[in-house]
Each structure stands twice: as structure tokens, then as C-alpha cells.
Image (tube, rainbow, N blue to C red):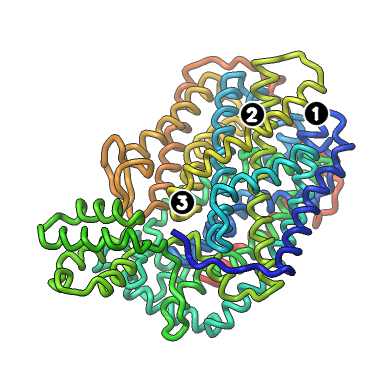
Amino acid sequence: MHQTAINLTFIDYSILGLYIAFVIGIGFALKRYMKTSADFFLSGRSIPAWVTGLAFLSANLGALELVGMAASGAKYGIATCHFYWVGAIPAMIFLAVFMMPFYYGSKARSVPEYLKLRFDERARAFNSISFAIMTVFASGISLNALAKLLNQLLGWEYNICLWVCSLIVLLYVLKGGLTSAIYTEVLQFFMIVLGFAPVVWLGLKDAGGWTSVKDKLAGVATDPVALNLVSDASKTFKPDAWTSAWTPLIAGPSQNPMGVDLFAMIFGLGFVLSFGYWCTNFLVVQRAMAAKDMTAARNTPLVAAVPKMLFPLLVILPGMIALALSATAGKEYRLPQAIITQARMTTTIASIKQSASGGTDLATAQENLSAKAGVSFNPAKIAALLKSPETLTASDEKLAIRLQDAVVNDYDGVILSLVKRYCPTGLLGLALTALLASFMSGMAGNVTAFNTVWTYDLYQAYIAPDRSDDHYAWMGRMVTIVGILLSIGAAYFASMWSNAMDIIQLVFGFVNAPLFATFLLGMFWSRTTATGAFIGLVSGTTASALFHACTISQGNVPGVKGGYLAKLAVLPSDMAQNFWLASFAFTVCFLLTVVISLATKRTKSDEDLKGLVYSLTPKQIVTQAWYARPEFIGIVLLIVCVYLNYLFW
């Protein structure tokens, strides 16, 4: 069910229309430069570092960034900044200093093709398939979030939003390929900043400034069930749970809203998921590989790291502001919820009365209520209703209020609710355009990565080798259409999660976590064999599936969110489950790869591995000044990152 929609004015529609026309125009304008498959898939390796750097960052600015981070800011607080200062910056620096020379120097056209050069076709084929599946899901998550927001903001029909937005992305990617995607991503970066900076400033001003936000969140931490932040009525946190990045984390999983411990955060996110995403995900690596030379390729992640460190102000702070406003009397604001329709409310009230009078257990009562209402409920508040004698005697109006209050928060709607609250005519159009830009950049990034991997690493390698260059360019365009259609299907699947951040990290855990173990050993241990890499990679991915099938997070029922084979462990939150899944998959892949490599023979000589393994690759002759070298810039960025962690300790 939808919240009250708002009406756009002519000015708002004009801003939105101009943006859409402009990005489609970029695609058509660049079409004449797409003469070869390399132009379409890799931009001919001709783009400067500042452009590839902003595109590198903007390709990640989909649902994961704007919707997911704002949602997590409300749900988990400032600990969400760890996705930047622990889970991004160190890995981006590592990619620039150590890994880009291998990717760019080997002249591999994709990450799977690097695996072929380092190992063999088996590793390449498996990674190509798993990566293609991941990009479809990631694209679908962005698409679902965009259609959902347009549906709630403007009242546009969800299915129509899916198809229209997909068509826009299809048009400019189909015509201009990767070059079109990169230049529109740069435009989208500036649109996102211009569109959301005013919303953050107005929200912070409305909340009374940062000090006032901290004070309100301290009160929230002592009674989180009041705002449906936890499912246990007795659960409380220390006052700094939402405003301190490290202190609640060090205190243990029961003392922080994210429900993770120090090991899961540092190893699961800071090492496995972070390095797995930024160092092996072809979506972002592809942008660096489009740079004009090796220097520009290595500088690409470093350029992106500068704004990346500051983005929590733009994407996480709004969620914290929304939570503070919810706890402030007189602001007339609450975290978004799905609304129970009047027709469903009548049957829901009858169901709660029947459950209360018949002594139905909580799990059964909640399942029945969710089926009647079409929404999910907070178990703690439903338990209170079942125990209260007033449930059987209260008026339907009073029960309706209490039932609606028990509906779980729709965290993905947080950024939308602030846009609706603060944006007047004109600014609303700009903010809506920024939302559209963010989701289209995320979707386009995944689609361009998908068409490259399919064409080069699956179609050309195994289905139709030795065809003409024009044929592969044609196939790239055709599979772009297929990728868009698959993304639409994935969007419907992603609609089952209330927080885009939770599902995207789950997808990364399945694919990137074991892949990073394979890359780490392959790049830095020449003894790693092709058989060891392949079996380790397959086993790590299988291990992630088994871990998910046998664990579940609190408040979830067995199904797509885990526990469908067994419930061997119940973890505090979806995010904790994701971090431990990634750690488990990485460890299994790493250990098996080492053991099997020691038991099998190498099929490639040291000469074959030059340029592919760190210890066997001749050191480059450095011609840059010391202050312009990636190593020095990386150290400076790390120092700034450490300071930010200290500042919000």
C-alpha cells in the first residue's frame, strides 16, 4: 500500500524531462564513435582519470548508496559509515596500488578474462556465470528501489515505472555503450550532489543541528521498540548506540543496532566483502580499465576515494535525521510504513481479536495477521496486543491505530519521506531527478558489465568463437536488451526486502567473497594451481549457499531470507548474517585452494605468469614525482580515513 502521493508542477516535470532527454541524447551522440566492439565495451581505453574516477564512484551510486545507506542510517545509525571508512577506502587504495597494474597491464578485457590468463577456462567460465547473475540482481535492486520510490512519491503504477525506467537506460546504453554509461555517470554524480545536499541541510536545520540529533538518538537507543527498531520489547541500548561508530561495536553484538561483533565487521566487511567488491567486481574495475593509460587507470580509484569518504554526510546522515525527527514531539513525522488498507484492516482486526480470545501462539497469530493485512508486523507489539485485555474490548478505531503502529518500518522509504517533506517546487524536481540519476547509473553500470562479460567471456569464448568484430558488437547490443529484461525480473524478487542494503550485501557475499580469496592467492602466490582455484571457487560459493540455508536472522521466517534447510544459528540481524556468510565463504575458498594447490601440479610456468603474479612481474620504472605516485596518495587518504574513524569513535 502507498503513502500519500504528491503532485509535480510544470517546473518539476521540465527538470526531469530535460535530464532524461539529455542522457538519451548522450547515447545517440556517441553512437557514431562506436565503430568496434572495443569501443562499445571498453570505450577504446581513451578516457581521462577524473572522468573514470567519478564514473567509478557513480556506478556504485544506485540503490545501494542513496536508498540503502539512508535506510541503514535510520536502522543502524552511524555504524553504517563503516561501509565507507572500513568497507571501501582501504580496498580502493589497494586496487590502485597493487591490482590495477595487473588488470590494465595484462590487457584483459574483463575480470573473468584475467582469471583465464592466470588459471584456465574453468575459473573464467564459473566466474563469468556467477558475475552475470550478480549484476542482474544488483541491477534489479536499483530498478526495484526506483520504481518503488516513484510509486510512493508520485503515485505512478509500480509496473509501469519498472518498464519505463528500464527503457530509458536501454536507449542510452544501447546506442553509446560503455562510453555513454561513463559520461552519463559523471553527470549523474553532480546531479546527485546538487539534488540531495539541500535535503540534508534542510533536514539537519529542522532537527535542530547535529547536537540535537545526537540527543534525540540517545533517547531512541533507550527505547528502540517504540519506533519499531527492534523486535524484542525488552531490548535497550546505551545512549551512543546510533551516534558512535566503534564504542557500541567493541561492546559486542548485543550492544549495537547492527548486531555485529568486531571480528565480523573488520574481517567480514572490512576485508572480505570490501576487497571482494572493490578489487574483483568488474562493474567498478571496468571504469578504471577504460582509462587512457596505466597512470590514469591507477588514479581512477584514488580520485573516487576523495568524495567517497565524504558521502556519509549526503546518504547516511538523512537516515539519522529521519530517526531523530520521529522521536521529536511536534514534528509530525514518523519513519515510513506500509499502510494497511481499510478493506484489509477490517479482516485484520477480526484476526487479532480471534487470536487474542483463542490463545493463539505469537508465531501463528503474526503469520495470520500478515496474511490478512498484506504487511509485516513487529513481533513485540503484536505480543503486547495479544496479552492486553483491551484487545477484546477496544473499539475498532483504537485497534486500527495500534495495528498500524505495529507495522514494521519501510526503511527504504526514508529518503523519499524527506524529499516529500522538504522539497518545494523546483527543488522537488531536482531531488527527483537526482533519485532517477542514481538508480539509472547503478542499473546502467551493471548492464554494461553484464553485456561485456557475456559477449567476451561466454559467447565469444564458448558459443561462437572466431566471428567478426561487428558480430560481437551486435551481440553486445542484443544481450543488453536481455540484461534489461532479466533486471526487471530481479526487481520483483528484490521487492521482498525492506532494506536494499541488506539484500545487496547478501548477493555480494555469494559471489565476491569467495572470488576475492581466489584473486588474493592467484595474484600473490605463484604456487596456486588452476585446479585449486576452480575447486576452491566453486566450494566457496557452495559454502555461502549452505550457510544461508542453515542460518537466519532474528525476526525472519525460513524462506528466501535463510534457514530453509535448517536453523543451526540465529543471528542478530540481516547484516550480521551477511558478514558471517561472507567470512565463511572466503575462508572455505581460501583454505581449499591452498590445500588443493599443494596437492596438484602447476600448469603454467613462471614465464607464463609474468604480469599476472606480483612476485614474478618486473617492477615498473617510476617517472612520476613522489607526491603524484599512487602509493603516496594512498597513504594520505588512509590517514584521513583513520582520522574520520577517530572523530566519530
Q: Which residue is mark 2?
A: 112
Q: Disc 3 on helix, strand or loop?
A: helix
Q: Disc 1 on helix, strand or loop?
A: helix
Say whether disc 2 or disc 3 marks the residue closer to the N-terminus: 2
Q: x%, y% of residue 220?
A: 38, 75
| 188 vs 578: above or below | below
Q: x%, y% of residue 86?
A: 54, 56
Residue 218 occupies quadrant: bottom left
**Image position of 456 (left or right of 214):** right
Q: Look at the numbered discs 3 and 1 and tell me whether their residues touch, using CB distance below 8 Å.
A: no
Measured in 3D between alpha carbons, the distance from the residue under mark 2 to the one under mark 3, in whole angstroms, is: 26 Å
Q: Residues within 10 Å of mark 2 (few under 14, many from 20)?
A: many
Say whether disc 1 or disc 2 marks the residue closer to the N-terminus: 1
What amino acid does circle 2 point to? Pro
Say whether disc 3 or disc 1 marks the residue closer to the N-terminus: 1
Q: Is residue 257 visible?
A: yes
The single residue placed furthest to the left in the displayed view is 358
Q: Residues within 10 Å of mark 1 (few under 14, many from 20)?
A: many
| Residue at x-position 46% and y-position 76% | 333
Q: Which residue is mark 1?
A: 37
Residue in the foreground of this view, choosing between 352 and 607: 352
Q: Which residue is mark 3?
A: 502
| Residue at x-position 64% and y-position 24% | 118
